[in-house]
């Protein structure tokens, strides 16, 4: 069962409740993170907290706790959960206000940390690869709500995921308004062609993933050239290998896009090698 830290108090799943007048509920007005712990040790906590604070700052929410307090709650939750491998979900909402949209009516942000487990796909997908389709729902325009903000406004990604479900696919890729490939419903994407590894750059309409950054480091350490470059569907269709990265997803091979096999139509050797290296890194 999930363990929840709600504004300083530890609660179980049935007793952790927030107000219906919280603007996180009324307007999706808030930000969050998704973090994993392996063997009881939190992976790249600093990077996740940096991103949480940047997301909050970008939408002008003041987090009413010191960074060390949130870090402490996360570490304590992992220990208390007794889970060897845990998934941690910190959430900061604008807080309780009235029915109007004005954030000035919300004097204090609500902070929640949920500690639980997560599994998005069955384990065999990590060998077989995922079937993926292109969603018609685009990534939000950069100057509307920056895709770099990990906000509680996930509806475009949810709509894309529904399209994938309707098509019977494991996952989707989302494009920007110009048709460039951005990311999955909750993952960054990489393509491999003749040994060269490419992934869209931070300005391309992506959430800059902590896993993405770790995989870039691992790939470079393994001697691969990695470029952060705009890609389109042609690059995925013609790739030797493609894979997703994300905290919940880890490294997930793509076996097909829009019914076309990617590479050999299964997890490729570079993808599997990076997956091995990733498993070693997170337990180091
Ligand atoms: N893009 C989106 C839209 C996401 O929700 C996530 C998951 N947080 C990612 C990419 C991957 O980011 P990370 O590796 O930090 O989990």
Image (cartoon, helix red, strand yellow):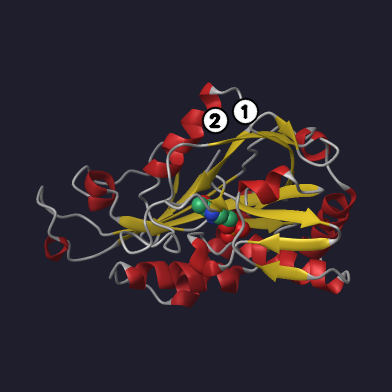
Quadrant that contains the N terminus: top right
Gap in angstroms between the C-alphas marked 1 and 2: 5 Å
Residue linked to disc 2 = 164
Asked if the residue at label 2 sits under 8 Å from ligand 1, the reply is no
Question: What residue do we see at 56% from left, 23% from top?
Answer: 167
Residue 25, position as x, y percentages in the image: 27, 45
247 displayed left or right of 157: right
Instruction: Using the rendered image of the protein, determine whether residue 162 is visible from the camera's viewpoint.
Output: yes
Q: Which residue is mark 1?
A: 169
From this view, report whether residue 258 is shown above or below residue 47: above
Q: Quadrant of the C terminus?
A: bottom right
N-terminal-most mark, 1 or 2: 2
At 37% from the left and 73% from the top, the residue drawn is 65
Q: Are marks 1 and 2 in contact (CB under 8 Å)?
A: yes
Q: Nearer the viewer, residue 112 or 154?
A: 154
Q: Position of residue 125 (x, y in %)?
A: 76, 34
- The secondary structure type at the circle numbered 2 is helix
**Residue 210 against residue 193 in the figure, above or below:** below
What residue sits 90% from the left and 50% below the top? 269
């Amino acid at each position: 069962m999930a363990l929840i830290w709600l504004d300083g108090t530890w609660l179980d799943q049935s007793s952790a409740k927030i107000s219906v007048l919280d603007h996180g509920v009324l307007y999706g007005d808030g930000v969050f993170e998704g973090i994993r712990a392996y063997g009881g040790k939190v992976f790249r906590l600093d990077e996740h907290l940096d991103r949480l604070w940047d997301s909050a700052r970008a939408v002008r929410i003041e987090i009413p706790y010191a960074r060390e307090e949130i870090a402490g709650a996360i570490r304590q939750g992992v220990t208390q959960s007794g889970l060897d491998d845990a998934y941690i979900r910190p959430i900061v909402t604008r807080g309780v206000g009235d029915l109007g949209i004005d954030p000035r009516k919300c004097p204090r942000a609500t902070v929640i940390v949920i500690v639980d487990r997560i599994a998005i796909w069955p384990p065999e997908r990590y060998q077989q690869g995922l079937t993926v389709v292109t969603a018609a729902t685009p990534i939000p325009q950069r100057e509307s709500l920056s895709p770099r903000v990990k906000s509680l406004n996930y509806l475009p990604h949810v709509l894309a995921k529904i399209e994938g479900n309707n098509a019977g696919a494991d996952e989707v890729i989302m494009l920007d308004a110009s048709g460039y490939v951005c990311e999955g419903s909750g993952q960054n994407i990489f393509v491999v062609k003749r040994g060269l590894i490419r992934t869209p750059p931070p300005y391309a309409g992506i959430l800059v993933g902590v896993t993405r950054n770790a995989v870039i480091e691992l790939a470079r350490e393994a001697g691969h050239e990695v470029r952060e470059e705009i890609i389109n569907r042609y690059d995925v269709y013609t790739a030797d290998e493609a894979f997703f990265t994300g905290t919940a997803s880890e490294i997930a091979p793509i076996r097909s896009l829009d019914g076309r096999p990617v590479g050999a139509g299964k997890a490729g050797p570079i993808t599997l090698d990076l997956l091995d290296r990733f498993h070693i890194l997170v337990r180091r």
